[in-house]
Image (spheres, rainbow, N blue to C red):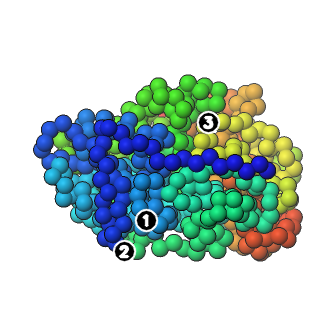
Amino acid sequence: MEFEVVTTEAGEVPASATQYMVRMRDGVHLATDVYLPEGNAPTQTVLVRICYDKNGRYTFMDRLAPYVTGRGYAFVVQDVRGKFRSEGTTMAFVHESHDGYDTLEWVSNQPWSDGRVGMFGDSYYGFTQWAAVASGHRALRAIVPRVTSADLGMVNGGRYRSREGVEDVDWFVSASYLSHFWLDQFIHDYPIDVERRPLFDVFEPAFEAMGRRSNSFDVVVPRKIPLQVYPDGHPFDAKPVPVLHSVGWFDNLQIPHMRDYIVLLSRPEWAPLQYLIADSVDHENYHLALAPIEEHVEHDHIENDDALQRLMPLYLEPALEFFDVFLKGVHPVDSIPRVRWHLGHEGYHQSATWPPAGAVERQLFLADLSSASTGGGTLVDTGVVESGSTTWVHDPTNLVRSAVENSFSFLYWYPDEAATGQRHDVLVFTSAPLVEALNLTGPVDLFARVSSSAPTTDVYCKLLDVDMEGHAHLIVRGQGHVIEPLSDRTSRIEMGHTGYRMQPGHRLRVHIASSDFPEYVPHPGTDENPWLAKDLRASTQSLHTDTIAPSYLRLTVNGS
């Protein structure tokens, strides 16, 4: 493989901003841009702490600034420690709580600040908001974390979270992220040979060629050593602040983000302060209504300035409305809905709760198991047709490939996944054509009895919308590492939440497999560390069902 590195260095500080080097408690200085509104009176501040270059086109902070300052806020954007124009050692996650506190303290003491700060941003700069909450600084009054999770440092560290005998599968994407984005102060794009084994070695040619390694990568891959992300305690145990969760139905971090929302709703001190806006977007903010972007490049806001300009209101306005309530206090709390959500292929809705009122659970049972490996399994809602089982082979040398090359931009491609169901190692279950439209409005889970010839196994499940031409497109997906795969034990594979309208004549389809590579680290078929395994063995998985303990898909549906 030809080795070529494309490096993204720091952009120019725009004339509309003033850059300061803000001192942290240990003497490290962080590059911080300040954009101010007209007038001299102290005002509220919107703060973004970012690792992707505060002056880069990718994050378009200078284009957001006029919208923020035009609403009367100071806008402060900072490169986090060790990235781009900031000083310090490059290390993901571990400094953000203390650095967040020190930055809030600096902002609070500026003459243009009235001491009230809200934070905003996507992904890693959604995580830095939670790190600031954990710091407990008095100035932080509201946050708008987008397509992220409070446990992002644990997700990217491969730290498992047990639930009902199932753990999170190790995410290969996280290791790639740490090696490309956290090698040093800049971002480096370079190819990796994902077929190399052991899998841990796929990054070694790049580290050798560039003469340095990613500290973050070396800590968490392959040993999964937990990072000390929150030195002063988890943010959910800190003083509550109002939160507007901005979730993408097609985001590859949707499951952990919705976990945050559901957990905080269960905590009496946090629940009254939780708000949700969920849209049919992926991690890069591509929208289902415009997909596939690949065929409509005029809608690619990453490359097209006009498309970016069109995105701005949808991207930023909900956050500014939230800050107008919880920072400025110019509107009452009841002026914004608790939940705003998009029903894919239909439109936007508001509700007091999520799932919305009227939503009910519906079970679709996995039937005709003997035909599932040849595409003939069925989904039925009248109970299990017959008891039975079926098998499929997981071959670590012939893996089920991921549907797209970059799941952060899933809707850029929005692929037809029908062909995947033609593989012998993918079980397929399909419903009868729908007589009328079906609205999916809430969580989706697979409950399956899976056994294996291997000590453990991985289960990947996708729910697809099959149109009348036979094209199959993703609705939601989930995956789990089954710790004790036994025929008499039911495992729950969490598939996340969705708002999605199925049209009359379309069919629901489920794909079940044991790999999704290179999105996830493949199971070696043994009990070895999958990053280090050289002895790869095929294993046989079995899916079981009967009238007493059926395997089934649990949907949340709504008639409105």
Please determine whether, in this image, residue 70 is positioned above or below residue 535. above
Q: Amino acid at mark 2?
A: Asp
Circles 1 and 2: CB atoms closer than 8 Å? no
Task: Name the foreground residue: 453 vs 353.
Answer: 453
Would residue 283 be visible to someone looking at this image? yes
| Quadrant of residue 159 within the rendered picture | bottom right
Q: Which residue is mark 1?
A: 88
| Quadrant of residue 557 within the rendered picture | top right
* Nearest to N terminus: mark 3 or mark 2: 2
* Nearest to N terminus: mark 1 or mark 2: 1
Please determine whether, in this image, residue 369 is positioned above or below residue 215. above
Mark 2 packing: few (<14 Cα in 10 Å), some, or many (20+)? some
- Residue 232's disc is 2
Residue 279 image position (x, y, % from top left):
48, 40
Q: CA distance from mark 3 to mark 2?
A: 39 Å
| Quadrant of residue 391 within the rendered picture | bottom right
- Residue 412's disc is 3
Q: Is residue 498 left or right of residue 395?
A: left
